[in-house]
Amino acid sequence: MVNNNELKKALDMLDSELKKKGISRRDALKLAGLGSASFLMGNGTEAQAATVANASEAKGKIVIVGGGLAGIATAAKLSSDLSNPDITVIEPNPISVSYQPGQTLVAAGIWEKSDIVYNTKDFVPNGVKMIKDKVAEFNPEANKVITEGGETISYDFLIVATGLVLDYGQIKGLEGVGHSAEANEKVSTIVGKNGLHSIYYADGAVNTWKGMQELISEAKSGKKLKALYTHPNTPIKCGGAPKKIMYLTNARLHEAGVRDNVDMWFYPNGSKMFGVPEYHEAIVKQFEARNMNWEYKNNLIEVDTENKIATFEKRWFEKGEWDEDLEEYEMIPVSKKVQREYDFMHVTPPMRAPDAVKNSSLAWQRGSASKGGWVELNKETLQHTRYPNVFGIGDVAGIPMGKTGGSARKQYKVLAENLIAAMEGKELASKYAGYTVCPLITDIGKVMLAEFDWSKKPTPSFPLDPTQERYIWWLLKVYLLKPMTVYGMLSGKA
């Protein structure tokens, strides 16, 4: 049974903040258009009523590979929707359900690491078997997985929820750097010191706050400094995070009165700030207003950590010969290496599927998704396109966008409903529409809530201009999303 003291504390803090603005929690949540508002208003009856359904009598052994946010939420939903569930979760990390979206707030000195770390055992649904191990091999033809510990586990239905790999090693100079939510010797020997930081793991977020304070201290001495922020050439989880940490650094520098001493540059691999035009335009205006610089089509390929030099591959097109048939010039792709010095740099690592997934027949066999090794899925049903008893969810899913906690919150209910339909031999009627949400922190006290789906159009939950930075969304980010996730989603209710 999860201890809800933290939820009560968070809600009391929220009420205190809202009171200053003359807003009630009920009105604020209605304004936010939150589907799980009743849960956060403390009205358990309404929230529970929304989950009441006739439990399915379908039977089958379900194995979930990955016990993070998506895996445990799905296990909880299936546990409540099946009358006789047989569910096994394979997960090596005892803190796999820790609240990763909070790492940005830790990196800005707003939260502590202890605010985001949770023990997985406290959220495992009753009756679900946990195996503390890691899957080394998938054999979907034989309906089996093999763990690193040598155990062979069979299944009737498989859910792949492994998450992804932060592949720092694709960047020269960061070879051998691994990833862990806890302290990792390989990471800490390179990342998190001497001006090089990354918020994509918990200890990295802690060190980023230390690095930000060091940057401020140097700026106060009168030095003219340069801060760089990168976005790689692969899909990443929380696509807004590289910009969020830049916005927050900007806020802290202003707060300290030394913003003019730091030249800030964002170097994304892509050619836009955001895939949704309305949000792209809003971010450009925000960058311009804050005197934050950017240059597109730059991919970080090497770091000299000792001399603080970052090497990027810069890409562009040059005009070639005139094509008389097409009546246009041939555009020739060109690239070159560009070295840039830095005093502070935030690295967003390239990301890919874990080796066991990437090297299996579950991975996409063609197209750009094959490069990352993502699981081949029908993007609406989340069912594997070649193995009908296999489903996928979360960061490892080979579907457009969707590598956010907000996406997983929409996906896990779709997956559970479709998996039960498959167990019952019925048509998979539940559809995931690609909903993704990015609470883009633009300042301390301001957030632009970017909601969208596969249409690449804003899909706001309430008729407010979604391109505007608002205090109400800051309250959502800082006070509501964590309890909604930790005590709502992980219980299969929110």
Image: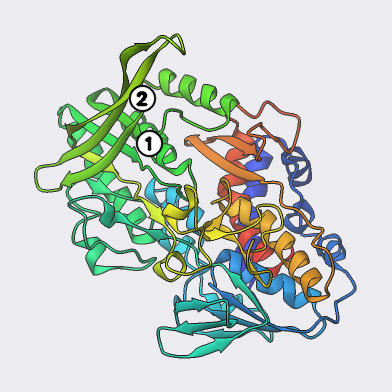
Q: Callout 2: 10 Å neighbours few (<14), some, many (20+)?
A: some
Residue at the right extreme, as displayed: 54
Tell me the SS state at disc 2: loop
Determine whether 468 is above or below 6 in the image.
Answer: above
Position of the C terminus by quadrant = bottom right
Among numbered discs 2 and 1, the one appearing first in the sequence: 1
The amino acid sitting under disc 2 is Met
Q: Position of residue 456 (x, y in %)?
A: 63, 34
Determine whether 142 is above or below 229 in the image.
Answer: below
Q: Is 324 on the left or on the right of 450, as rendered?
A: left
Q: Is 354 on the left or on the right of 26, as rendered?
A: left
Position of the N terminus by quadrant = bottom right
For image coordinates 25% across by 37% down, the residue present is 216
Q: Residue 292 carries which label?
A: 2
Residue topped by disc 1: 246
Q: Which mark is residue 176?
A: none
Residue at the bottom extreme, as displayed: 151
Residue at the front extreme, as displayed: 325
> Distance from label 2 to label 1 (Cα)?
9 Å
Q: Which colour scheme is used?
A: rainbow
For image coordinates 71% across by 67% down, the residue present is 492
Front-lying residue, 105 or 335: 335
Circles 2, 1 touching at the beta carbon (< 8 Å)? yes
The reply to whether residue 486 is in sight is: yes
Q: Where is residue 458 in the image (x, y as percent from the top left)?
A: 66, 32
Determine whether 442 is above or below 211 in the image.
Answer: above
The reply to whether residue 494 is in sight is: no
Determine whether 381 is above or below 244 in the image.
Answer: below
The amino acid sitting under disc 1 is Met
Q: Position of residue 147 (x, y in %)?
A: 45, 84
Q: Position of residue 397 (x, y in %)?
A: 56, 58
